[in-house]
Image (spheres, rainbow, N blue to C red):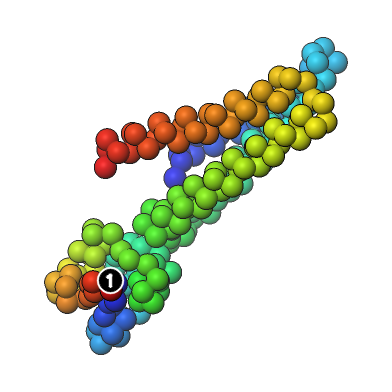
Amino acid sequence: MKNRLEEIRKTRGISQEALASELEVSRQTIGSLENGRYNPSIVLAFKIARRFGMSIEDIFIYEEEK
Amino acid sequence: MLRKKSFYLTTLVLGFVLVVAGFLLKEMVVKSIAGVMFGVGAGLFGMSLANLYMKALEDKNPEIKRQNEIEAFDERNTAIRNRAKAKSADIIQWFIIVLGYLTILIDAALWVTLSTVVVFALYHVLSAHFTKRFQREM
């Protein structure tokens, strides 16, 4: 699953550390999410979406497997 | 550092008691039992001391405490830990089989070989138990 987390975070001028602290996750989790190595739980996806005032679909892009 | 200070104080005392008991009883009971008491006690004592030190450090620095809690509850860390545990258990089961065959090769007592078989069977029983339980829960 792709996501626009890094782009959105940078646009808002928030560091990975600050975002991690706000969401109460580790900085490595934010890094892994941005790299697409880790897909968040639905709870964390909601937390991220709410933090940026967006919908989950605006941040996370689900693509059907071919 | 998710356990309370009282837990580590209890294990510290228990570890100390075991070390002292192991030392005092080495002449009175079977030497190997005293050795086990000494080993377990020393391990428990050391672990408790290290954790109490970490607790003291956390008390002085709330930021470290918060960070440690975040690291412990972080969903990715939890997933990684669970995956690592499952993978390790999968690998260990094959070592247990090898160990079982080794005990046959070295002509070990039957109960030793049977113990490895029991441990191997226990792994599968527990695995089936938890699969069923998690199927109910999830």
Q: Which chain letter goes with mark 1?
A: A
Q: Is residue B14 above or below residue B52?
A: above
Q: In the displayed structure, does residue B81 sit left or right of residue B18?
A: left
Please give the name of the residue rendered at 65% of the width and 29% of the height, measured from the top-left corner: B116
Judged from this view, the residue extending furthest toward the bottom is A11
The spot of residue B117 in percent (x, y) is 62, 28
The spot of residue A36 in percent (x, y) is 36, 74
Q: In the displayed structure, does residue B52 sit left or right of residue B132?
A: right
Image quadrant where one finds the N terminus of chain A: bottom left
Judged from this view, the residue extending furthest toward the top is B28
Q: In the displayed structure, does residue B82 sit left or right of residue B138?
A: right
Please give the name of the residue rendered at 24% of the width and 74% of the height, measured from the top-left corner: A63
Label 1 residue SS:
loop
The three-letter code of the residue at mark 1 reads Glu
Judged from this view, the residue extending furthest toward the right is B27
The spot of residue B132 in percent (x, y) is 34, 34
The image shows a total of numbered marks equal to 1
Q: Is residue B137 above or below residue A1?
A: above
Report which quarter residue B35 is drawn in: top right
Q: In the displayed structure, does residue B37 sit left or right of residue A46?
A: right
Question: Front-most of B134 and A47?
Answer: B134
Kindly identify which residue carries mark 1.
Answer: A65
Please give the name of the residue rendered at 43% of the width and 69% of the height, measured from the top-left corner: A28
The spot of residue A44 in percent (x, y) is 26, 62
Q: Is residue B86 in view?
A: yes
Q: Is residue B128 above or below residue A5?
A: above
